[in-house]
Image: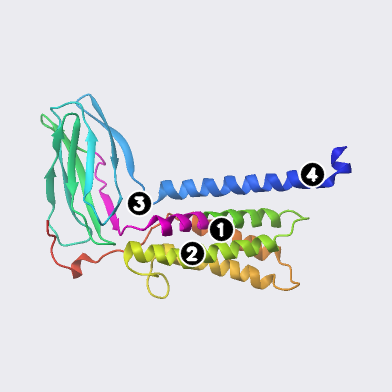
Amino acid sequence: MIEDKFPSIKISQHKKILWILAILITISSAVYQRLTGPTYSIRGSVTLENSEIPFKLLRSETTDQDVSITLSVKDTAIGGYVKYKRFRSRDEWTQVPFQRSAETLQAFLPRQPAAGKIIYYVYLSKNDVTLSLTGEEAVVLRYKGPVPAIVLIPHVLIMFLAMLFSNRTALETLDAAGNPKKLMIYTIVFFFVGGFILGPAVQKYAFGAFWTGFPFGYDLTDNKTLIGMLGWLFAWYKNRKNKNSRVAILFAALLLLAVYLIPHSLLGSELDYTQVGPQTD
């Protein structure tokens, strides 16, 4: 057999399978987090007077522009409006009618400061029938400052690598002949750079503060990062020098995966509108 004469081939194929599994786990968890997060756009369709209308409603926008609510509606007899107010404020509801251009309806919501939020409903009507695109559930739109690509892209890529190496390290611990210590170090380095150097830089651009987690606040993204790092530092401590604790490594990897699956930006920075002035157009 070839594997008997060249055992390195068998090992190489085995490692390749573990890397493929780690990549699949990482991509799957990233997609899940993206689709369940509070900033992911709401998509769907409604039927009004025999006209099916698809929609995409934004839940995240930057502070440098007003938000466009745009719908493709072929039936020119259909109109509507957007009703909004600042989130958790004492504001009265404001209605903005849709403006039609050919087959497009468009309305704008005013830009807000970083960490500001707007709550809104979108209504369409024809004849005596009016409906909300999201029923009784309002859409919450969160604003963030623009983050330069030179900061955001490395942050995203390095955090992806941190998760990839974390998952790969976990799989290595399950291999009786594996050596997860080197992979553990790569995981810690990537996670530190992505979560504690580039992460605060992104946070500063987006919301005006480097760190809003423990002990300064309750930002869940920052706290997730802190918990994940503590788990990996615990694994490193249990495996320093000649010590060997695969259980600690597996625990750290599973802990990071668990906190990573919590939707991104949940319980994030939020402007208190009761402490600022009234809405101005």
Q: Which residues are magenta?
A: 133-159
| Secondary element at image label 3 | loop
Position of 123 relative to 109 (above/below): above
Please name the residue that numbered disc 3 is placed on.
39
Could you give the CA–CA distance between mark 3 and mark 4, rounded to whole angstroms? 45 Å
Which callout, 2 or 1, points at the residue further toward the start of the chain?
Answer: 1
| Secondary element at image label 1 | helix
Let me know if residue 67 appears in the view: yes
Please name the residue that numbered disc 2 is placed on.
195
Position of 279 relative to 239 (above/below): above
Disc 1 versus disc 3: nearer the observer: 1
Which callout, 4 or 2, points at the residue further toward the start of the chain?
Answer: 4
Identified by mark 3, the residue type is: Thr
Could you give the CA–CA distance between mark 4 and mark 1, rounded to whole angstroms? 27 Å
Q: Which circle marks residue 162 in the picture?
A: 1
Which callout, 1 or 3, points at the residue further toward the start of the chain?
Answer: 3
Is disc 3 in contact with disc 4, using a CB cutoff of under 8 Å? Answer: no
Residue drawn at point x = 51 percent, y = 49 percent: 29
Decide whether residue 169 is among the magenta residues: no
Please name the residue that numbered disc 4 is placed on.
10
Residue drawn at point x = 38 percent, y = 68 percent: 218
Viewer-side residue, 9 vs 219: 9
| Secondary element at image label 4 | helix
Colour scheme shown:
rainbow
